[in-house]
Image: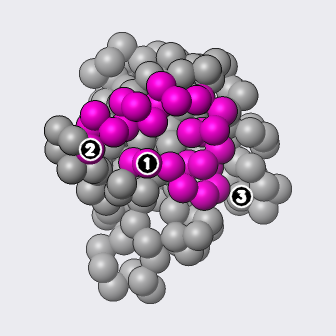
Amino acid sequence: MMIKLLLGDITRIEVDAIVNAANSSLLGGGGVDGAIHRAGGRAILDECRRIVERQGGCRTGEAVITTAGKLPARYVIHTVGPVWHGGINNEDQLLTNAYSNSLQLAADNGVKTIAFPNISTGVYGFPKERAAKIAIEAVRKFLKNDKSLREVVFVCFDRENHEIYERLLNA
């Protein structure tokens, strides 16, 4: 089991599954969500629509899985991170759940390699340092108890997040 860190575009990463920082509608949006839907093509949106018909979307902290369409991954795991409200709405636990539920869904589907973006740190406003600590802690805790995953990659789109993760991972 290994944790890696990359600076780049998650839609180009060759892993079994990439995680999408989705919104609860699952129908695409801005940031990484929009990039994944654009790069993966219609197949992802079609599966998301079927999930919405079946269960009404995806609640904050939960995760669902679809095809990866045209992406180099096999799957996209869509998880909804919390919008930051100053920490008064259980945001830390909801973000932990988003990572943990994504990892469990990956393990349940035979995923060996998975890549995560920086969930909730864009338009959802979660403080980057705090989110990185939660992400790393959730992944380490999961890997301690589950040996099915071989590699977890944190993919940072910007240097600021990359530097935060690099410092925390090396601490």
Q: CA distance from mark 2 to mark 1?
A: 9 Å
> Is 57 or 103 nearer to us in this picture?
57
Judge the density around disc 1: few (<14), some (14-19), many (≥20) Cα neighbours within 10 Å.
some
**Which amino acid does the dot numbered 2 rest on?**
Val
Q: Quadrant of residue 105?
A: top left
Q: Residue at x 58, y 65 (%)?
A: 121
Query: Label 3: which residue?
Result: 161
SS class, disc 3: helix
* Residue 73, position as x, y percentages in the image: 57, 20
Above or below, comparing residue 96 to residue 69 in the picture: below
Is the stretch drawn in magenta largely helix, strand or loop? helix
Q: Is residue 51 magenta?
A: yes
146 left or right of 112 in image: left
Instruction: Choose the circle earlier in sequence order: 3 or 1.
Output: 1
**Nearer to us: label 3 or label 1:** 1
**Which amino acid does the dot numbered 1 rest on?**
Leu
Judge the density around disc 2: few (<14), some (14-19), many (≥20) Cα neighbours within 10 Å.
some
Q: Residue at x 27, y 50 (%)?
A: 57
* Residue 144, position as x, y percentages in the image: 37, 32
Evaluate whether residue 14 shows in this view.
yes
- Evaluate if marks 2 and 1 touch, with contact meaning CB atoms under 8 Å apart: yes
Q: CA distance from mark 3 to mark 1?
A: 26 Å
The boundaries of the magenta stretch are: 26-52
Query: Label 2: which residue?
Result: 52
Q: Residue furthest left?
A: 54
> Is 159 or 14 nearer to us in this picture?
14
Query: Label 1: which residue?
Result: 27
Q: Residue at x 36, y 30 (%)?
A: 47
